[in-house]
Image: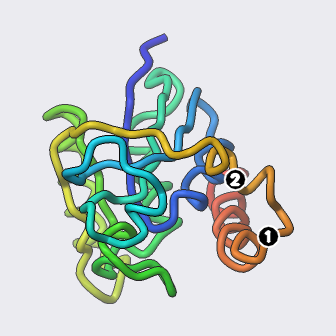
Amino acid sequence: MAIEKAVLGGGCFWCLDAVFREVKGVTEVVSGYAGGARPNPTYEQICTGATGHAEVVQLSFDNSVISFRDLLDIFFAIHDPTTLDRQGNDRGTQYRSVIFCQDEAQEVVAQEAIKALTAAQVFSAPVVTELAKAVPFYPAEDYHQNFFVRNPGQGYCQMVVAPKVAKFRKEFLR
């Protein structure tokens, strides 16, 4: 078993967290922050957009079970990579679509995935997902971890997270 890490941002981390917890081969999901200048930011600080951080998930995955490319296929299916600094009604740089490539191999795979999506015209607008080098990852506060499972009746979970989980289940769990 070879465990690797991936750090992905696709809007609110509650959505990504909920989906990737169901992916076979993903051994750990941690919601957090990456890509900003302030060390150890808080949720309140990143919500202002002033820290430069994105809401992200850090995935630990067994690459003998699921590849980084397969994770990216899921990632691109459950968020809109064509909207700059926005997912639905969530607006700001903290909601940007971003892949923090942990090494050169991940960067190559991410570039190939975006090129394939573009060639296949999967989206009606260009993919604007940022490809960035690995940066420090800061875990979010405990109450953000596994938020959807612990708060299924919460309004945002019902209106935004649940449909993304349902889409993932329909497209990837057959």
* Colour theme: rainbow
Q: Disc 2 marks which amino acid?
A: Phe
Where residue 123 is drawn, which disc sits there? Answer: none
- Callout 2: helix, strand or loop? helix
Identify the residue shown where x is 76% and y is 77%: 155
Which image quadrant is residue 97 in?
bottom left
Q: Position of residue 8 (x, y in %)?
A: 38, 50
Q: Position of residue 105 (x, y in %)?
A: 19, 33
The residue lying at 45 percent from left, 57 percent from top is 75
Left or right side of 144 for 107: left
- Above or below, 129 against 156 in this view is above
Instruction: Give the label on residue 147, or none.
Output: 2
Residue sitting at x 44%, y 19%: 3
Local secondary structure at mark 1:
loop
The reply to whether dot 1 and dot 2 touch (C-beta < 8 Å) is yes
| Amino acid at dot 1 | Gln
Q: Residues within 10 Å of mark 1 (few under 14, many from 20)?
A: few
Q: Is residue 38 left or right of residue 64?
A: left
Q: Which residue is mark 1?
A: 154
Res. 80 image quadrant: bottom left
- Most foreground residue, 40 or 25: 40
Q: Quadrant of residue 63?
A: top left
Q: Position of residue 84 (x, y in %)?
A: 28, 79
Seen in the picture, residue 108 relative to 113 is either above or below; the reply is above
